[in-house]
Amino acid sequence: MLGSVCGRRQLPVVGQPQPERADAARNRQKIIDVAARMIESRGADQLSLDEVAKEACVGVGTVYRRFGDRAGLVWALIDERERRFQEAFMSGPPPLGPGAAPAERVGAFLAGLVDRVVSQLDLFLLVELGSPKSRFGGPYRVHHTHLATLLAEARPDADPHFLADALLAPLNAHLISYQRDERGLTVEEIKAGVASIAAAVTARPAP
Amino acid sequence: MLGSVCGRRQLPVVGQPQPERADAARNRQKIIDVAARMIESRGADQLSLDEVAKEACVGVGTVYRRFGDRAGLVWALIDERERRFQEAFMSGPPPLGPGAAPAERVGAFLAGLVDRVVSQLDLFLLVELGSPKSRFGGPYRVHHTHLATLLAEARPDADPHFLADALLAPLNAHLISYQRDERGLTVEEIKAGVASIAAAVTARPAP
DNA sequence: ACACAATACGGAGAGCTCTCCGCTTGACAG
DNA sequence: CTGTCAAGCGGAGAGCTCTCCGTATTGTGT
């Protein structure tokens, strides 16, 4: 099936400050490559770290030392697009980036996040099965902080942290997957629904 | 009790036990008892079905035949209180039951659900790790239908099904657990936050 | 009372996640 | 170049979830 990567040497990447030893970095990359290929060819739900290790010619211990657990490896696979998304909402052009009104940026952010989740749905499904720590650590924290900041501007009277959680919650991969596959909602309908809730929440409270 | 079956095959109905052989019923009860005891003494996250089987003196196959998987067994443990809750919001006194205004019932329902999740938090955490089928089947469907019905009355112009999902999403056990244990929110604060969102969503849209 | 489906049973075993620990290797000072 | 040792490595193994299938039990029609 998959051609084995065993024995092939990885070219060293220059320019990156490396807190890792060379062999460790090489293994990390090999593992990521193999995992990405296996997911592409067989689907994310079939991902077995045992098998990844075998295919990458490393011990299973190495996989776990590098990535902690299943969810950690999956985050690494998600990472590249995630970074691009973070750049977009932190320093890209409006309405996602700075320059637009807070309420408008909230809408753009949530719509963008729906797209992101949908575009890597099976990976996000896997992440959500991981430990709470991996779930609410890393990217979730970044999204939450960003959204809470925007909400604090749009609605200074409400609790922005709770509001951010509440707006992010309906974007979880399991719910979106269920809405799309079992209830027949389209991505556009989901985005419209999210937008209407965001609008209700960011509107000035009725007098 | 169940009416006579007259040779007809009964379809499995969620929540209603289908006619079981005497030995099967005996085993189901033994398994539930043992599982409840083990959870009480050691915590839900330590629940091992292998061990439950051994302790209940049945084969592990029996456990899985009865309950399908881990999440199925956990639902069975949750079931009794869940039924009481369902009765309360379907036919109990207002504001949870019929008689109050829809928006008020939405608030009471969500507050009640927060209490329910918190009161059996570790069981709900376990359920959320199960398959999407078990997660969105059974009780979720009941909650969703009820809430969507109320929302359709309160806000005839919006999509009540999506809205119901979006209001239920922030009540997931993992988020509540994280908010309470990591961010130090109290249950009352969570309920207040949920209430304010429900209020925003059920309010008439601004002109 | 008895036979015979239908139903349930037990537990071996496949396959997984993750831990542990004795051995190996890379980085660097001298 | 070489010695040192923190960092990294592999894979055996514990413990789990869930499946499979030959065997045993139950309830029913006669």
Image (cartoon, coloured by chain):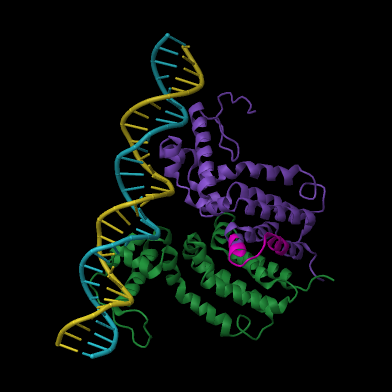
Chain colours: A green, B purple, C cyan, D yellow
Q: Please check the rendered image and state whether residue A185 is part of the magenta-colored stretch, yes or no.
A: no
State whether residue C1 is above or below residue A187: above
Tell me where residue B5 appears, x and y as whole percent.
59, 26
Judged by its main secondary structure, the magenta piece is: helix
Which percent across, then down, holds residue B34?
A: 50, 39
Q: Please state which of residues B60 and D29 is positioned toward the viewer in this rendering.
A: B60
Q: Is residue A14 left or right of residue A153?
A: left
Viewer can see residue A98: yes
Q: Nearer the viewer, residue A34 or A40?
A: A34
Which residue appears at 50% of the width and 34% of the height?
Answer: B30
Q: Is residue A37 visible?
A: no
Placement of the C terminus of chain A among the 4 image quadrants: bottom right
- Quadrant in which residue C10 is drawn: top left
Residue B61: where, in percent of width, then height? 41, 39
Residue stretch rendered in magenta on the structure: B177-194
Q: Quadrant of the N terminus of chain A?
A: bottom left
The residue furthest right is: A207
Q: In the rendered view, does B142 fall on the left or right side of B108?
A: left
Q: Residue A91, relative to residue A36: is it above or below?
A: below
Q: Residue at x 39, y 64 (%)?
A: A39
Q: Position of residue A82 (x, y in %)?
A: 50, 75
- Residue A59 lies left or right of residue B126; in this view the side is left
Is residue A109 shown above or below B8? below
